Structure formats: C-alpha cells, structure tokens
Amino acid sequence: MSSFVWIDHSEKQRRQVLEAIDVFREKDTRDELGLAGIRDAIAEALFPGTGTQQTRARYFFFVPWTVRRYTEGRGKMSDAARKIRAEELGLIDILADSETPRPRGIIGIDARTSLQRCPSSIYWNGLKALRICTSPYSLGDYIRYAERSKNSPQALLDDDRNVVSGGLSVWPGNLPNAPDNFPNGVRIGLTAEEAGFLKQQVSAQRPDSLFAFFVREGVAETKAPFAWDQPEIESASTSLRSRAHRSITFCRRPAIYRAAHP
C-alpha cells in the first residue's frame, strides 16, 4: 500500500492539493491543455471567494459560528479540530430535517460520516477572500495556534515576535451572531441580516467583481447558462463588461469549449 504526505503553508496550497487528489478519484477527468489555472484566474476575477464545491451562502456563517465555538471563549481547549468536524457532520442531519422537501445544497448529504471535505475546509479560503476572516493562516494552522495560545497564559508569537493568536479577533465585530441553540433547529436559508452583511463584505472587499455587481443590483436567479448571459450585465461598468466579455471570448473558443465539454 502506497501513501504520500505534503506540507502546506497556506489554505490556498492545501486546497490545490486536495483538488488535485480529487482528480484521481474521478473517471475521465483530464486537464491536458493546462486550463485549470486559467479557469481559476477567471473565476477569482469575476467571482472571488467562491468555488464549485460551495453550495449555499449560509455556510459563510455556519463555518465562523462553528469554528469560533471551539477556538474562542473561556477555559482551556483541546481537540478542537475533531470537535469542529463532529459538529459539521451533525449539521448535515439537522439541515436535512429542517424543511420538507429537503433543501438543496446540503454538503455531505450523501457521504454523511465519510465526508472528506467539510464546509470549513471548502469555505475557509472564501471567508478570507471576502475578509469575513482576517487570519492569514490555513484552517488547520489557525486551529492549532488558537488551541496552543488558549492553553498558554500568553499570546502565541511567531519567530518574528508577531502575535499569531490570542490577540485581536480575526472575525469582524458586525458578523451576525449565531441563532440561539445553534446548530439545533437551524435552516439553510440566509436571514435578512446575514444577506445584508454578506452583500456589504462582497461590495467592500471586491467592488470591481461581477460578484459584487450582482449582489448590489439584486440580480435574481435565472435559467441563464452562464453569468455573462444575464441581461443585467449590460448595465455594468465599462471595465467590468470588458473583463466579462474577454472571459466569454476565451471560454467560447472552439478548442477551449471542447476541452471543457468533452
């Protein structure tokens, strides 16, 4: 039996390795033309902080609420990563039973306890891109640093004597609070307060993105096959329309289209 290990220094590197591993689990998935990097660059320019594995916007709040429960507050902390995963797995059943018919987009609804990537892993990079979390570290490092600093009377410092954890919170003060008794009884749809906060973050942190334009304009969900097919895009700024149309031109080149749609 063979195995391999790696050292990741950032959440972005960790996500790239996990996505590479996922490729080996899929049949007939190839990137012979090396388009993945270009695809990621276009996605980051137009819809920063998002990815194909993200399903519902309220996970941008589920993750902070869960992580903060086990990395902040009084008392010593131990085994935080396991507790966070356990709560995220428990959330699957809670969301599945919250509405009838079952709501779309529940992460892990089929895998259940065998889920490989929990919402915290999927959404961590997006939380940082939208400055909902200001930690520069990967999720694993953040949990480890928080755990070590809480179990120490002093804040944890790095080699340059900068505060790594134990100092100011990495979460914004206006982040909506978790509902009472969270996660029990929670639903997957955003509240008005949460939607307003997310709109504010996207507009403030990535104002020149198509993502920000859509949330500012309140563009409704439609059956348009691509974001740039939304009729509202024609009222966007000249620079944003230009960027979107360059993406259209690239993605609709015959060779590119055949590679993306084998």
Image (tube, rainbow, N blue to C red):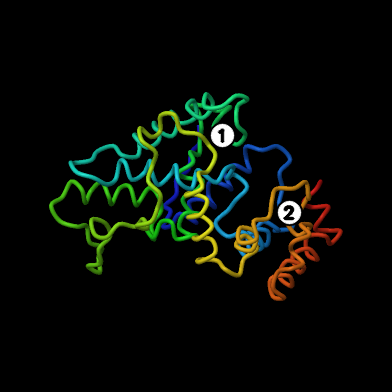
Q: Residue furthest right?
A: 254
Amino acid type, label 1: Ile
Instruction: In the rendered structure, find residue 122 and report the number of the disc placed on it.
Output: none
Specify the quadrant of the image occupied by residue 21: top right
Instruction: In the rendered structure, find residue 32 and report the number of the disc placed on it.
Output: 2
Q: Earlier in the sequence, mark 2 or mark 1?
A: 2
| Identity of the residue drawn at 45% across and 46% down | 61
Foreground of the two, 228 or 173: 173
Say few, some or many: other residues with alpha carbon within 10 Å of mark 2 (under 14 / 14 to 19 / 20 or more).
few
In this rendering, would 140 be left or right of 159? right
Amino acid type, label 2: Glu
Say few, some or many: other residues with alpha carbon within 10 Å of mark 1 (under 14 / 14 to 19 / 20 or more).
some
Foreground of the two, 126 or 206: 206
Q: Position of residue 218 (x, y in %)?
A: 64, 56
Specify the quadrant of the image occupied by residue 133: bottom left
Residue marked by disc 1: 106
Could you say whether the residue bearing mark 1 is in a helix, strand or loop? loop
Q: Position of residue 45 (x, y in %)?
A: 62, 65
Q: Position of residue 129 (x, y in %)?
A: 49, 60
In this rendering, would 186 be left or right of 251? left
Circle 2/circle 1 CB separation < 8 Å: no
Q: Position of residue 220 (x, y in %)?
A: 69, 51
